[in-house]
Image: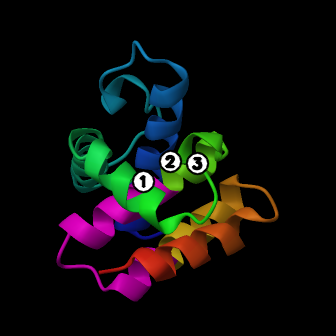
Amino acid sequence: MRNRTRAREFALQSLYQMELNTEATDYTDLVTAPADKEIISYADQLVKGVRDNQKSIDDSLTKTLTNWDINRLDVIDRAILRLATYELFYVKDIPKAVVINEAVELAKKYGTKESSVLINGVLDKIKP
């Protein structure tokens, strides 16, 4: 598994856990799997980036979701959308298609049967 893919998984797991455990403030408290510094660094950047920009990310997602409230989304779907939206808008060295593909793969692995279709559709509409 590639480093950024693994970092995205750690970040997703952390964002998910942080949403369920509001006392958690740092993903490093939540990730227990051993990883090299590059993976931890990128995962940390993703988590902090999502947390620091969550209002604008959620605003963008809310505008994109048709007749649907972001808070009604499944927690894992919401975390994947936030993570990918952060990458689309704030991480400039990754092609948009790669971000969307990685998010769809996360949805297939961690979400429901319908998650990947939802994630793909929303991110395709929201991409800058």
Q: Position of residue 7 (x, y in %)?
A: 38, 55
- Report the residue marked by disc 2: 79
Q: Position of residue 69 (x, y in %)?
A: 58, 48
Q: Nearer the viewer, residue 22 or 59?
A: 59
| Relative to 117, 76 lies left or right | left
- Report the residue marked by disc 1: 82
**Label 3: few (<14), some (14–19) or many (≥20) C-alpha neighbours in 10 Å:** few
Q: Main secondary structure of the magenta part?
A: helix
Question: Quick check: 128 above or below 10?
Answer: below
Q: CA distance from mark 2 to mark 3?
A: 14 Å
Question: Quick check: 41 above or below 90?
Answer: above
Which residue, as the protein is rendered here, is positioned at the far top?
A: 23
Q: At x 40% / y 46%, what residue is drawn? A: 11
- The image quarter in which residue 85 lies: bottom left
Q: Which residues are magenta?
A: 81-100
**Label 1: few (<14), some (14–19) or many (≥20) C-alpha neighbours in 10 Å:** many
Q: Position of residue 84 (x, y in %)?
A: 41, 64
* Residue 89 magenta-highlighted: yes
Q: The disc labelled 1 sits on which kind of residue?
A: Arg
Where disc 1 sits, the SS reads: helix
Q: At x 40% / y 56%, what residue is drawn? A: 83
| Relative to 5, 103 lies left or right | right
- Report the residue marked by disc 3: 69
- The image quarter in which residue 71 lies: top right
Which-is-in-front pick, marks 2 and 3? 3
Q: At x 67% / y 44%, what residue is drawn? A: 74
Q: Please say whether residue 74 is visible from this viewpoint.
A: yes
